[in-house]
Amino acid sequence: MVRYFYKSLRSQQVKELKDYQRGCWIYAEAPTEQEIKQLTEKFSLSAGHLEDALDIDEMPRLEREGDQSYIFVRFAYKNDEEELVTVPLLFIFGADILITVSQVPLPSLDVFLSGKIDFATTQRAKLVLQILQQISEHYDTFITRTSKQIKLIRSRLRGHEISNQDFIDFVLIEDELNEFLSSLMPTNATLRRLLLGRYMPLFDEDQDIIEDLLLNNEQSIEACNSNLKSIKNIREAYSSISSHNLNYTMKVLTAVTVMITLPNVFYGMYGMNIDLPFQNQPWAYALIVGFTVFLVILMFLFARKKRLI
């Protein structure tokens, strides 16, 4: 699907055009082979770069061919399974054109079309940076939600209420954070190259926006690393607590086994069908029971003194 949007500095609303007009934003979402061919022929584009934009594993990078710059980034979104993933987005910046190519809808497209952001398609460089700002804000939102989820699980650790599902969630969160890192770090390298001004003409205001994006991405990277470290610490803490509890349980069971085994020795001896001391005395039963109770108490006190239980 290829759509054409136009908005000048003076207009209040975004217009969707039926065909290309100078100064418009060409929005390509999951384009077909026929649409890629049409765009390539109409604007003298590199078909290979357009096909790369539809490769789910394409990483952020910056290319220049002739007077056209190809800027690859990745943005985060929730797929149909409600999983957080990142997908590539291609900006094609030329002398008279701005084209975006993606496999899925841009999460910020509705924000631009609804008029919540003041932009103009005729200011192509600024529009690219505004889209990048929205992508950065989406990363911040997802990372903040992840941080809250980790803190919630960490609070349950104090009450020993962590379940197996929490550790499954940890695995999924780690995958999401690692995917964010693999997208944000090369994106920063791309932004630094954009600052040189060789790939896209920049005004002072545009350079300030890129510097803000770099700073924000660095903070997002630090937040991802901090969350990954928190997950590791929680997992290690839970492992230590579980190991300690297991050792304590084994000590208690061992002590209880000893306390039960020793009295059984005397009960077993006096259960044999042979002559035994005091077997004809009326107080023999009370003596044996009393002695075994005394022995159990003695073993209990010894275990407590040695901190076995």
Image (spheres, rainbow, N blue to C red):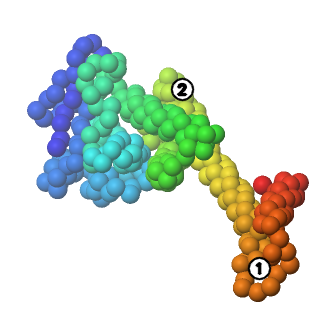
Residue at disc 2, secondary structure: helix
Tell me, yes or no, if residue 50 can be seen here.
Answer: yes
User: Which labelled disc corresponds to residue 208?
Assistant: 2
Q: Position of residue 120 (x, y in %)?
A: 31, 22
In the rendered view, does 235 fall on the left or right side of 136? right
Contact, mark 1 vs mark 2 (Cβ under 8 Å): no
- Position of residue 208 relative to residue 84, above or below, is above
Could you tell me how far apart the alpha carbons at marks 1 and 2 are, in whole angstroms?
92 Å
Q: Residue at 82% across / 60% down in the picture?
A: 290
Instruction: Using the image as rendered, state which of residue 294 and residue 229 is in the foreground.
Output: 294
First in residue order: circle 1 vs circle 2: 2
In the image, farthest residue toward the bottom: 274
Residue 68: quadrant of the picture: top left
Q: Nearer the viewer, mark 1 or mark 2?
A: 1
Residue at image mark 1? 269
Residue, x 28% and y 56% (percent of image)? 51
Q: Name the one closer to the observer, 45 or 225.
A: 225
Measured as percent of width and height from the top left, residue 270 is found at: 76, 77
**Residue shown at 16%/43% (left/top)?**
1
Horizontal relation, residue 47 to residue 21: left or right: right
In the rendered image, which quarter is residue 101 located in? Answer: top left
Name the residue located 69 percent from the left edge and 58 percent from the top edge: 249
Q: Nearer the viewer, residue 227 or 106?
A: 227
Judge whether residue 132 can be spotted in this image.
Answer: no
